[in-house]
Image (cartoon, helix red, strand yellow):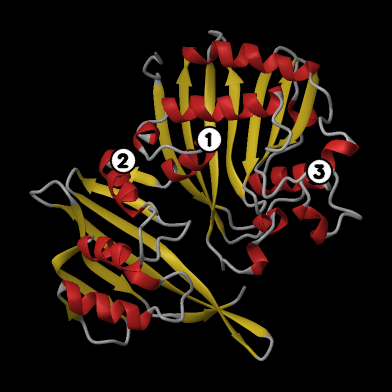
Amino acid sequence: MFKAFAAIAFSALVFGAAPALAGDSPGSCSLESWSDPWDCAAERDSTRLAAYGLDPIRAVAKPGGFLLRVMFSDDYDRPLPAIIVERLPSGGGRMTVVGLFNDGPSGSVFMNMAAWTHPRRTVRVATLASNDMRSLLSEARGVFESPDQVATVEDRSSVCMHPRFATVEVAEGDRWVSRGRNGCDADEVWAFAKKAAEFAVEHLSPCAALDPGNPYYRLQDCLRLTGDRVAAAEVLKALTPRDFQDAAAERAYQLELRAPAVRLEWAGEPVVTGREAEMAAWDRLTKDVGNMSEGRFFHTGGAVFTGISSSEVMVSETVWYLIEKDDSETAISAHASYRWRLGRDHRWRVEEISVGPFTPTKI
């Protein structure tokens, strides 16, 4: 059983400029190579550090210190949370979880890790201090004994599609180590990275209350919760994608997420009220936005869920999409917000939706 952590805080920072690349910047490695799980390992690690604004581990190693860093990215090399643990004089640790959230277009410009050094991003941070980290810090020393690489040339010929990536770094005193792995390697270093993420999920309330899944995705979602985070987590769970038997079943579910008297205010359009009328208007207005069929809400990766109270949650986000015309792309964006309330039947439903106006935005 995990003990209650001693302290926890959530915050959000908007970086106005991209940090300089940490370590060696990408050289001969091409963008096409990034799809390979083993190519460009050094460049991938370097750009991951840059995305989080971190110095190379060798630059932060210091006498008497102990630092652990675990950084993840998904199968498209988009950054997932970074976990940073510093040993305290008590022997416990202070953990900081850092998440990057895309405040820019979701098109090809943002499909690789290097794009996340773009200034238009939001950094959200959660910190906690706990003596329960002693065993995690002790186990981290095993990374010093791990090989630099796991996969042989023969291993690399095997089929491995869309793995997740992790970099585990440890600095103790003036010695340091950095190991990059992917889900195809599945060795002790990869297992430790996942264990560190699971540890953070268990300690950061209410991360553990979110739908089960990969711990690094749960951490990313947890950093999107503010205010009454328990209420915010319940709304996020209601919006989590599900498997439906057919389109009609999904549409019925999306309809049930709307209050009977739901109100839609879309810039430049008449106000619409009532569940059926709102959903019909929503379908018409979002027909040119990908993956918006069956009444789905936008729910972008940058959405923030704010618990106003135990029975009211506001969701806000910047909605982006790209308009393709004459072999060129134009980004447009709008602010969207949703007011959710908990009904007497203990189900969350959206009562008010506000979108717009959409305006051209420089990428």
Q: Is residue 276 left or right of residue 140?
A: left
Look at 72% across and 15% down and name the residue there. Answer: 142
Q: Position of residue 184 (x, y in %)?
A: 71, 38
Badge 3 marks a residue whose secondary structure is loop
- Image height of 138 relative to 206, above or below: above
Please identify, in this view, whether the residue under mark 3 or under mark 2 is nearer the observer: 3
Question: In this figure, which residue is indicated by the disc labeled 3?
Answer: 38
- Image height of 63 relative to 235, above or below: above
| Residue 88 appears in view | no
Q: Which mark is residue 10?
A: none
Badge 1 marks a residue whose secondary structure is strand
Q: Earlier in the sequence, mark 3 or mark 2?
A: 3
Kind of residue sitting beneath label 1 = Val
Q: Position of residue 245 (x, y in %)?
A: 35, 59
Distance in Å between CA atoms under marks 1 and 2: 16 Å
Badge 2 marks a residue whose secondary structure is helix
Question: In this figure, which residue is indicated by the disc labeled 2?
Answer: 229
- Residue 203, by quadrant, is top left
Q: Position of residue 185 (x, y in %)?
A: 74, 33
Q: Position of residue 180 (x, y in %)?
A: 75, 35
Question: In this figure, which residue is indicated by the disc labeled 1?
Answer: 97
| Pointers 3 and 1 in contact (C-beta within 8 Å) | no
Quadrant holding the C terminus: bottom right
| Residue 84 appears in view | yes
Kind of residue sitting beneath label 3 = Trp
Q: Earlier in the sequence, mark 3 or mark 1?
A: 3
Look at 59% across and 24% down and name the residue there. Answer: 85
**Front-most of 113 and 277?**
277
- Residue 258, by quadrant, is bottom left
Distance in Å between CA atoms under marks 3 and 1: 26 Å
Kind of residue sitting beneath label 2 = Arg
